[in-house]
Image (spheres, rainbow, N blue to C red):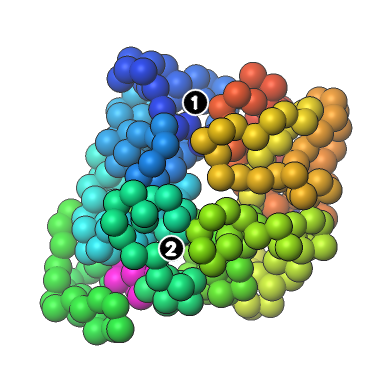
């Protein structure tokens, strides 16, 4: 049986001391990982500096991203940054990677938001480059988007053959890529092609179950080695969506992204999704829910 793992997305703090205290609280509660988003707009720290500080403040807590936007960094740069952080954290990096999608990021920075198919194809090449550069010896690659010439980067990651790679998404191309390449898959709603937010037509239990079926079929004999999870966007009671958040859980009732009810209800729902549908890695999306979710983590983590 798959064991529960829990992570929390933490976006900002008013000082280095406050950030370290947040990381230590997660570790003491039993969370497995602190995850940092990657956006150019909104109240969010930059991921690599934030992950490094969290790793230095803790001894067991893994640090990761949900998720790095591939469009913002060349994969050779990302491979170097990731390997360095994995070394400095003694092998605690969990790299979440996505295409980049939020239109506001691209518009504010003057970047071109390519169609989804282009971004997914570029991400697939980036994953190949990352794994190649994390390997031993010089690596070369020629693709439609990247070209690498006998590059042998150092340091190499502590984790071998590479840090755990998380891919997140909801569209069929992203899920198929994740099934082939990821160690962890974070399932969510498909995003509109124009980057303005989740596609409401992709909401609900039936759509979520269809994603699980797609992953199982695409993964083949890799399936049992995959860790499946999702982000809990509404917990306990219905709350308004934060003004900075692009998440829209309004249509996600009866999915694991919306867990409502008493403490016992939440435990039962999490066990149902683990035991019946193989989801075991749950990410708390809102830090405001930390007090309510911490007892759940203390009871279920690692079980």
Using the image as rendered, state which of residue 199 and residue 81 is in the foreground: 199
Secondary-structure class at tag 1: helix
Residue 47 on image: x %, y %:
34, 41
Magenta segment: does it hold 42?
A: no
Q: Earlier in the sequence, mark 1 or mark 2?
A: 1
The correct choice, above or below, for 238 with respect to 146 in the image is above
Question: Which mark identifies residue 27?
Answer: 1
The C terminus: image quadrant: top right
Q: Quadrant of residue 100?
A: bottom left
Residue found 62% across the figure and 62% down from its top: 190
Residues under labels 1 and 2: Cα distance? 29 Å
The correct choice, above or below, for 100 with respect to 65 in the image is below
Residue 218 on image: x %, y %:
63, 77
Secondary-structure class at tag 2: loop
Crowd band around label 1 with a 10 angstrom C-alpha radius: few (<14), some (14–19), many (20+): many
Query: Magenta stretch mostly in which secondary structure?
Result: helix
Residue 271 on image: x %, y %:
79, 43
Could you tell whether 248 is left or right of 12 in the image? right
Q: Quadrant of residue 72?
A: bottom left
Residue found 81% across the figure and 34% down from its top: 260
Using the image as rendered, state which of residue 224 and residue 171 is in the foreground: 171
Residue found 54% across the figure and 55% down from its top: 196
Residue 87 on image: x %, y %:
25, 45
Question: Which mark identifies residue 99?
Answer: 2
The span picked out in magenta is 123-130
Could you tell whether 50 is left or right of 217 in the image? left
């Amino acid at each position: 049986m798959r064991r529960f793992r829990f992570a929390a997305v933490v976006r900002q703090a008013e000082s280095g001391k406050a950030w370290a205290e947040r990381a230590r609280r997660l570790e003491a509660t039993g969370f497995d990982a602190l995850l940092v988003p990657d956006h150019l707009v909104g109240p969010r720290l930059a991921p690599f500096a934030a992950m490094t500080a969290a790793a230095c403040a803790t001894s067991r807590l893994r640090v990761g991203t949900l998720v790095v936007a591939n469009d913002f960094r060349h994969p050779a740069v990302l491979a170097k940054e990731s390997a360095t952080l994995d070394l400095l954290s003694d092998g605690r990096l969990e790299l979440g990677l996505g295409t980049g999608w939020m239109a506001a990021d691209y518009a504010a920075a003057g970047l071109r938001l390519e169609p989804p198919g282009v971004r997914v194809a570029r991400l697939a090449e980036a994953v190949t480059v990352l794994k190649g550069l994390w390997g031993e010896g010089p690596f070369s690659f020629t693709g439609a988007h990247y070209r690498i010439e006998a590059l042998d980067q150092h340091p190499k990651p502590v984790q071998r053959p590479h840090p755990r790679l998380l891919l997140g998404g909801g569209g069929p191309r992203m899920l198929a890529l994740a099934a082939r390449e990821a160690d962890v898959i974070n399932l969510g709603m498909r995003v509109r092609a124009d980057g303005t937010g989740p596609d409401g037509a992709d909401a609900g239990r039936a759509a979520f179950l269809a994603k699980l079926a797609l992953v199982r079929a695409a993964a083949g004999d890799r399936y049992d080695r995959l860790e499946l999870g999702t982000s809990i966007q509404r917990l306990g009671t219905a709350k308004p969506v934060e003004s900075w958040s692009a998440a829209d859980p309004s249509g996600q009732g009866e999915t694991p992204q919306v867990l409502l009810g008493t403490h016992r209800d939440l435990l039962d729902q999490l066990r149902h999704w683990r035991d019946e549908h193989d989801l075991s890695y749950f990410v708390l999306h809102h830090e405001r829910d930390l007090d309510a979710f911490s007892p759940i983590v203390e009871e279920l983590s690692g079980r």
